[in-house]
């Protein structure tokens, strides 16, 4: 029996409530790694529901950030709000589990906050963090999302994207870059090439004047970027000279996590 065929009412209303939940779950399950973007009609056809019903479900999910619209196609993809719902399961996320002891070592070594970030295609999101022991520090709640082009972790993830994809994200506003023009796009692409060549990204007060961030990529067995290690610190505590040391420590931590995951460096650096 498809979700659309299930009974809608009973004497106590339990079946109707169950049907709504089943339908909602069916909509979420239509998204797959092979087909992460779907339109209302596609989803309706797959779950056997009317398009208006699917639209209502998606509208509710969008309000709760369980799904989001792709800025280019206006089709839907799963949203990062699902991570908040599945928060207790984050402990089972392999990258997070492997990264935790490395982040602790990194924070002890540098005295600054270490974090693990993941990418959903248009946002960098914090999934693990070890806060600095200093009274004045920069920390962020798990689940916090970043879309600023100058964010160190965003730079890391975009440096692994195709140039045209980067331009699309910037022009659409999905990734924010104030005062963007063609010259700015060219300059930003050069910045990303420098990030890829150096092995870590720098945000020296460019997103927030009081904060410094450095980030480095974590790779999987295919050589694809699956996460980024981030160090964040108050700017007053990080001189230009110290910045180099933080970058090297961040890159070393990311490399350690990569190796523990059985990963390897990107193909471009082979």
Image (tube, rainbow, N blue to C red):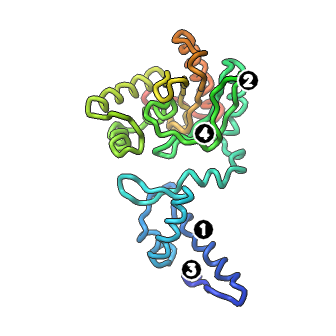
Residue 139: percent from the left, percent from the top?
64, 32
Q: Which mark is residue 46?
A: none
Q: Which mark is residue 133?
A: 2
Q: Quadrant of the N terminus?
A: bottom right
> Is 164 positioned to the left or the right of 92 in the image?
left
Depth order, front residue of 40/33: 40
Q: Which mark is residue 126?
A: 4
Real-space CA distance between mark 1 and mark 4, rounded to the nearest whole angstrom:
26 Å
Q: Which residue is mark 3?
A: 2
> Is 166 positioned to the left or the right of 13 in the image?
left
Sequence-earlier tag: 1 or 2: 1
Q: Which residue is mark 1?
A: 25
Real-space CA distance between mark 1 and mark 2, rounded to the nearest whole angstrom:
42 Å
**Among the 4 quarters of the image, the one containing residue 219:** top right
Q: Which element is circle 4 on?
A: strand
Would you say the residues marked 1 and 2 are in contact, meaning their CB atoms lie under 8 Å apart? no
Would you say the residues marked 2 and 4 are in contact, meaning their CB atoms lie under 8 Å apart? no
Real-space CA distance between mark 4 and mark 3, rounded to the nearest whole angstrom:
37 Å
């Amino acid at each position: 029996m498809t979700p659309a065929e299930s009974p809608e009412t009973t004497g106590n209303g339990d079946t109707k409530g169950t049907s709504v939940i089943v339908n909602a779950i069916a909509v979420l399950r239509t998204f797959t790694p092979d087909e992460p973007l779907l339109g209302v009609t596609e989803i309706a056809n797959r779950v056997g529901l009317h398009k208006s019903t699917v639209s209502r479900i998606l509208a509710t999910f969008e309000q709760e950030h369980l799904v989001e619209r792709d800025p280019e196609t206006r089709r839907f993809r799963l949203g990062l709000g699902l991570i908040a719902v599945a928060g207790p399961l984050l402990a089972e996320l392999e990258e997070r589990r492997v990264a935790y002891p490395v982040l602790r070592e990194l924070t002890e070594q540098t005295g600054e906050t270490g974090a693990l970030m993941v990418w959903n295609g248009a946002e960098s999101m914090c999934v693990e963090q070890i806060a600095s022991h200093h009274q004045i520090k920069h920390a962020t709640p798990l689940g916090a999302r970043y879309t600023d082009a100058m964010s160190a972790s965003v730079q890391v993830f975009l440096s692994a994207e195709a140039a045209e994809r980067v331009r699309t994200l910037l022009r659409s506003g999905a990734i924010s870059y104030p005062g963007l023009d063609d010259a700015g796009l060219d300059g930003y692409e050069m910045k990303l090439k420098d990030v890829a060549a150096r092995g870590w990204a720098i945000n020296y007060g460019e997103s927030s004047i009081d904060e410094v961030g450095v980030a480095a990529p974590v790779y999987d067995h295919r050589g694809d970027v699956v996460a980024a290690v981030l160090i964040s610190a108050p700017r007053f505590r990080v001189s230009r000279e110290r910045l180099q040391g933080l970058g090297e420590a961040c890159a070393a931590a990311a490399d350690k996590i990569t190796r523990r995951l059985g990963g390897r460096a990107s193909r471009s650096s082979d």
